[in-house]
């Protein structure tokens, strides 16, 4: 059974290229992707995760204001009774000079994995397979079924 991931761009950010590439890569890897698109609110992420019984939530932000957009996000997930891996990636902070500190800041906010804007989709896929305990064989079988 394919694992369901919620994907979208949070806040006022309207950058769509990254999530389009991620959606295609995740789908090809056997994941069921619910793409919420751009300018997605925290509530929309939470509602979609509940409605689709999601296994993970992937948040993208490229315009540098992710910290403001994600404040309180994990508290909303907890209030909704959701305990699932959350990923964030992109250009997360304006003037993102110290990546290590940026990553730590988002981990303290509750994100399971934090990726910079140079991350290849396969890195996120590999992380999801580990975090969701999905074997490569399982995702390969799902990919074959999807194209059969």
Image (cartoon, rainbow, N blue to C red):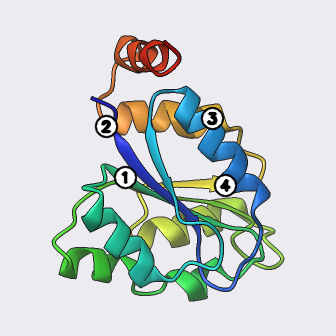
Give above or below for 107 relative to 87. below
Tell me how far mark 2 sits from mark 4, CA to CA.
Answer: 20 Å
Q: Which mark is residue 121?
A: none
Q: Considering only order in the chain, which callout, 3 or 4, is on the residue closer to the N terminus?
A: 4
- What is the secondary structure assignment of the residue under circle 2? loop
> Mark 1 vs mark 3: which is more N-terminal?
3
Question: Residue 127 at what x, y percent from top left?
Answer: 47, 37
Q: For the residues marked 1 and 3, what is the alpha-carbon distance in whole angstroms?
A: 15 Å
| Residue 19 horizontal/vertical position (percent) | 67, 54
Mark 4 or 1, closer to the camera: 4
Which quadrant would the N terminus be assigned to in this image?
Answer: top left
* Mark toward the viewer: 3 or 2: 3
Between discs 3 and 2, the one toward the N terminus: 3
Judging by the rendered image, the residue that carries numbered circle 2 is 132
The residue identified by callout 3 is: 25
Contact check, label 2 and label 1, Cβ < 8 Å: yes
Q: Given the current orientation, which residue lies at the most extreme left position?
A: 81
Task: Say which residue appears at 54% left-offset and 35% top-offset.
Answer: 27
Q: Number of marks in the image?
A: 4
User: Sequence order check: which comes first, mark 4 or mark 1?
Assistant: 4
Task: State how far apart marks 4 and 1 are (Cα).
Answer: 15 Å
> Tag 1: Cα neighbours inside 10 Å, few (<14), some, or many (≥20)?
many
Residue 24: image x %, image y %?
Answer: 64, 38
Q: Which mark is residue 56?
A: 1
Nearest the viewer among 41 and 147 is 147
Mark 4 Cα-neighbour bin, 10 Å: few <14, some 14–19, many ≥20: many
Q: Earlier in the sequence, mark 2 or mark 1?
A: 1
| Relative to 39, residue 87 above or below | above
Residue highlighted by disc 4: 19
- Mark closer to the chain start, 2 or 4: 4
Marks 3 and 2, how far apart at CA: 17 Å
């Amino acid at each position: 059974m394919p694992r369901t991931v919620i994907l979208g761009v949070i806040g006022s950010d309207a950058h769509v290229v990254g999530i389009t590439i991620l959606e295609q890569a995740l789908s090809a890897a056997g994941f069921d992707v619910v793409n919420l698109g751009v300018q997605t609110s925290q509530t929309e992420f939470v509602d979609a995760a509940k409605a689709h019984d999601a296994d993970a939530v992937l948040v993208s932000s490229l315009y540098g204001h992710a910290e403001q957009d994600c404040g309180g996000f994990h508290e909303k997930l907890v209030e909704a009774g959701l305990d699932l891996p959350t990923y964030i990636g992109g250009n997360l902070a304006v003037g993102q000079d110290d990546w290590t500190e940026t990553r730590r800041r988002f981990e303290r906010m509750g994100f399971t994995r934090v990726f910079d804007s140079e991350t290849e989709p396969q890195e996120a896929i590999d992380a999801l397979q580990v975090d969701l305990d999905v074997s490569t064989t399982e995702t390969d079988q799902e990919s074959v079924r999807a194209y059969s």
